[in-house]
Image (tube, helix red, strand yellow):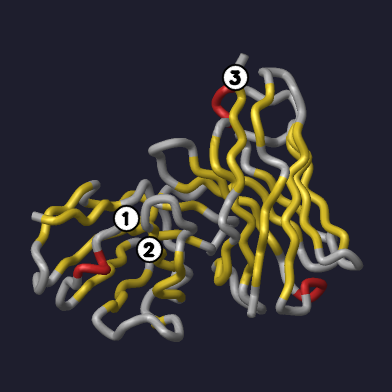
Amino acid sequence: EVQLVESGGGLVKPGGSLRLSCAASGFTFSSYSMNWVRQAPGKGLEWVSSISSSSSYIYYADSVKGRFTISRDNAKNSLYLQMNSLRAEDTAVYYCARVRLVEGYFDYWGQGTLVTVSS
Amino acid sequence: DIQMTQSPSTLSASVGDRVTITCRASQSISSWLAWYQQKPGKAPKLLIYKASSLESGVPSRFSGSGSGTEFTLTISSLQPDDFATYYCQQYNSLWTFGQGTKVEIK
């Protein structure tokens, strides 16, 4: 069974940093591209960042470029999101999501982890 | 960047109704469109990919159509479990979601 479990969320002050993790199981993690998607309270879904299976291709939404860094450790079946210079508008539930092989859509999602940026 | 616009934002319907949600892309995305269902406090769930392909395990009352810039998600006979928010997503060029359509009980 495919499982994605996010962790690392919490309360952080504006300008602070946080590192999110996503632990994957039930599939060959090293074969799949992975993404982070966020959802501000009461709002819609916003794609944040993507990383290919071997980390060769990395993409960011303009809203986080230069502040967030996506990475992965295929030996540990883990995906990460390093978030720096956090702003109030980064407050959201952050989901990790798997991209179906050879496709572009997201077939499995984690349960999400809440990041709150507030003084 | 490709923008996705869904309509309506909210839809009030009754059990058994036929429901249609529209999603428009700011430029052609061929058929690179997915639909997701999200319930409060839960992660999104994939329903449709490549505009009209039904994900395994998803009830056949869900269907998708369209190509280019205009797409629709149809629920042929709304069931109690279908009251949720629905999002379209383009994956032709990076990824963009529509703003969502909440299907609520009339």
* Residue at image point 57% right, 63% down: A109
In the image, is residue B89 above or below residue B61? above
Q: Is residue A62 above or below residue B30?
A: above
- Say whether mark 1 and mark 2 are on the same chain: yes
Separation of disc 2 and disc 3 at Cα? 30 Å
The kind of residue tagged 3 is: Ser
Residue B81 sits in which quadrant?
Answer: bottom left
Discs 2, 1 touching: Cβ within 8 Å = yes
Tag count in the figure?
3
Could you classify mark 1 by the number of other residues whose Cα lies within 10 Å: few (under 14), some (14-19), or many (20 or more)? many
Q: Residue at x 59, y 69 (%)?
A: A104
Question: Which of the chains bears the disc numbered 3?
Answer: A
Element type at marker 1? strand
**Could you tell which of marks 2 and 1 lies nearer the N-terminus?**
2
Please give the name of the residue rendered at 74% of the width and 37% of the height, measured from the top-left corner.
A68
Q: Is residue A116 left or right of residue A80?
A: left
Mark 3 vs mark 1: in front: 3
State the residue position of label 2.
Answer: B37
Residue A118 numbered tag: 3
Tell me the kind of residue under disc 2. Gln
Residue type at the position of mark 1: Thr
User: Label 3's element?
Assistant: loop
Q: Could you tell me which residue is drawn at 72 percent across and 43 percent down?
A: A8
User: Can you identify the residue that label 1 sits on?
Assistant: B85
